[in-house]
Image: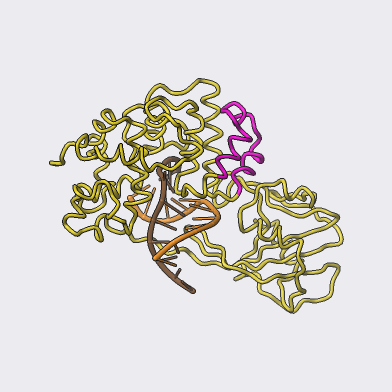
Chain colours: A yellow, B orange, C brown
Amino acid sequence: MSWPASVDLLAPLAPWFDRVRRDLPWRATDLDAPHPDPYAVLVSELMLQQTQVATVVPYFTRWLDEFPDPRTLAEADDDSVHKVWEGLGYYRRARFLKAAAGYVAAEGWPGDLEGLAGLPGLGPYTAAAVGAIAFQWPTPALDGNAFRVLARLLVIEGDPRARAMDLRTWLAPALESHGPSRMTQALMELGATVCIPSPTCGVCPLSNRCGAYLESRIGDIPPVVKRTRPKASQLWLVSFEAEGHVLLQTPTARGLLAGLWCWPTFDAATHHPQPTAPGPHSITGWPGWIQVYTHRREAVSPLHIHLKSRFIPADGLRWAPRENLVDLPLGRRDQRLRDLLGTPGQTPLEAPDPVTLIRSLSER
DNA sequence: TAGCCGTGGGA
DNA sequence: TTCCCAAGGCT
């Protein structure tokens, strides 16, 4: 590798950032001092994993309001933790954050990068970012933004992530020279606002030294990565109601929507609709929708089945008072059915047989 | 190691 | 409509 020294190549980044930086609720005023609240940095970094700044801001504010310090978070119950995270996605991050807060409350902050990387939910990027932004350690944090910026600046062929070790070694002197917190955030801010996939090189402070720009290779550096197609499925999403209670699946430890409460679901490929027959129950349906996750596409058909009385719930199921529904953490899909319960639906001409559905609940 | 884990916004 | 992707980490 024969890259120009990072101290010189990245020098314009510092004054540029001091001029244009966004005012974010977790961002310190003085970027030359250690952050006054390392916990706020930790919270922001976990929330920002795979999540855009505009989405995080209101969640961050609410989170610090509810859990202002590590001990408060560590002592909170899982439902209330997930409730504040509700809608933000990747819910495992909330549990990691609580576990990390428990460690910090008991043992204090780790004193080095390896210590931070040992906290749950902190990988190579997040540990280095907290080190630099909270503690002013010269620990190079490479996220998707930084990889894209540096790949273009240095004309790195192929996947820049394969050069992570080289890039960290190269970047460290620039952190030392221009300030770890400032430089770390400047690099990401450039990638998030200017050096985006379709960049606006006209306003970039580094364009006069950017290899990809000078060689007209912005379009193919870095290369786009092929993604796997999400798997398709179709399901019934069912709210059973009886005696003022609704039936919910209790939170699971792993898998999709782990940590959240869910409505019972039934594979629509095996539970075929049939003409609705009169019975000791009533069925209400609403128009369905496509629920999109990273690796799945669900065709969701929401139903409400009102029963005369409750049945004994199988393992993993629980009858909850209907008025408690608003206090339980739900994913977007299940929030949507919860909200439908207060709106008029229609008796569907065809629906799966409730008795068959209930019987299948105990066969899981 | 490649698949898994949410959601929302923009092109 | 469809695809991309956004301050990644875990197994």
Which sits in the foreground, A149 or A1? A149
Q: Is A249 displayed left or right of A165 in the figure?
A: right
Query: Which residue is more in the foreground, A289 or A190?
Result: A190
Q: Is residue A268 left or right of residue A55?
A: right
Image check: A167 left or right of A248?
left
- Front in this rendered view, residue A91 or C10: A91
Q: Residue at x 34, y 54 (%)?
A: A196
The magenta-colored residue range is A58-86
Residue A289 position within the rendered picture, expressed as x and y whole percent measured from the top left:
60, 68
* Magenta: main secondary structure: helix
Could you say where residue A258 lies in the image, as x and y percent from the top left?
Answer: 58, 47
Q: Residue furthest left?
A: A2
Residue A109 percent across, percent down from the top left: 47, 23
The picture places residue A278, in percent across and down from the top left corner, at 84, 75
Quadrant of the drawing holding the C terminus of chain A? bottom right
Asked if the stretch drawn in magenta spans residue A81, the answer is yes
Q: Residue at x 34, y 37 (%)?
A: A184
Identify which residue is drawn at 61% across, 66% down: A300
Snapshot quadrant of residue A146:
top left
Q: Residue at x 51, y 25 (%)?
A: A104
Q: Is residue A236 above or below residue A334?
A: below
Q: Is residue A41 magenta?
A: no
Look at the image and tell me in which quarter the N terminus of chain A lies.
Answer: top left
Question: Residue A310 sits in which quadrant?
Answer: bottom right
In the picture, measured across the screen, residue A256 lies left or right of residue A15, that is: right
Judged from this view, the residue extending furthest toward the front is A19
**Residue A54 against residue A236 in the figure, above or below:** above
